[in-house]
């Protein structure tokens, strides 16, 4: 039965043999107290971003379609400037997004991953034109050029990557840029 499902996914183009996965996000996606959706490139709602109000820290919850919590995105308890933490549903740290160097051309951030390699983020964060890289390998890209809808940008994630961590880091960057 599992093989049949895999073949069905392959025919649909979103299974293991498929290329990168694209998500569509709104520029004003994150807002404390509001809920928003992240859609796939077919316009289907895939992840919900729940802006939890009445919390001491800025907190957003990334949920799947059924409402199951996948990640919590929040400012650190001891606020370090330009740092946000991504926690898993059991409170484990999935990553910490930190502002790295400011250069004249582009901003840089790092996602510190517990047991895995750090992810470097660089490009024009404010204009949603940036890349996620491990070493010199691009693993994801954020861009406005894939969608013609105003105030919309895309996140393209290579196969085999943790979509939840990359999408949560993208939401964290929006919050850190003052869009949340």
Image (spheres, grey):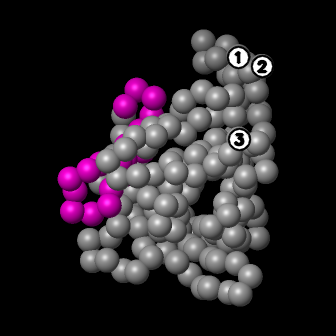
Which quadrant holds residue 96? bottom left
Which quadrant holds residue 75? bottom left
Mark 3, other Cα within 10 Å: few <14 / some 14–19 / many ≥20: few
Distance Cα–Cα, label 1 vs label 3: 30 Å
Residue 134 located within the stretch drawn in magenta: no
Q: Quadrant of the C terminus?
A: bottom left
Which stretch is magenta?
A: 50-67
Comparing marks 2 and 3, which lies closer to the viewer?
A: 3
Residue drawn 37% across the image and 31% down it: 67
Tell me residue 144's x, y (percent). Answer: 73, 52
Tell me residue 88's x, y (percent). Answer: 37, 51
Q: Name the residue carrying label 1.
A: 8
Helix, strand or loop under label 2: helix
Q: Name the residue carrying label 3.
A: 149
Specify which label sits upstream in the sequence, 1 or 3.
1
Tell me residue 125's x, y (percent). Answer: 63, 67
Find out whether the residues at labels 1 and 2 contact each other: C-beta distance under 8 Å: yes
Taking the image as drawn, is residue 115 in sight?
no
Q: Name the residue carrying label 2.
A: 11
Residue drawn 41% across the image and 67% down it: 84
How many numbered tags mark residues here?
Answer: 3
Please tell me whether residue 69 is drawn above or below residue 119 in the rendered image. Answer: above
Helix, strand or loop under label 1: helix
Which quadrant holds residue 7? top right
Mark 2, other Cα within 10 Å: few <14 / some 14–19 / many ≥20: few
Distance Cα–Cα, label 1 vs label 2: 5 Å
Specify which label sits upstream in the sequence, 2 or 3.
2
């Amino acid at each position: 039965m599992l093989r049949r499902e895999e073949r069905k996914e392959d025919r649909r183009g979103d299974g293991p043999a498929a290329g990168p996965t694209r998500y569509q996000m709104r520029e004003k996606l994150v807002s404390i107290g509001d809920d928003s959706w992240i859609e796939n490139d077919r316009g289907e709602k895939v992840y919900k971003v729940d802006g939890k109000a009445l919390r001491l820290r800025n907190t957003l919850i990334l949920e799947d379609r059924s409402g199951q919590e996948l990640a919590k995105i929040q400012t650190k308890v001891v606020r370090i400037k330009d740092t946000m933490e991504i926690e898993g549903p059991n409170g484990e740290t999935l990553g910490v997004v930190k502002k790295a160097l400011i250069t004249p051309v582009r901003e840089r951030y790092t996602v510190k991953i517990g047991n895995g390699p750090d992810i470097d983020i660089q490009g024009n964060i404010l204009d949603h034109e940036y890349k996620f890289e491990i070493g010199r390998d691009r693993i994801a890209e954020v861009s406005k050029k894939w969608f013609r809808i105003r105030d919309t940008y895309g996140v393209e994630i290579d196969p085999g990557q943790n979509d939840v961590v990359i999408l949560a880091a993208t939401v964290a960057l929006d919050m850190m840029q003052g869009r949340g």
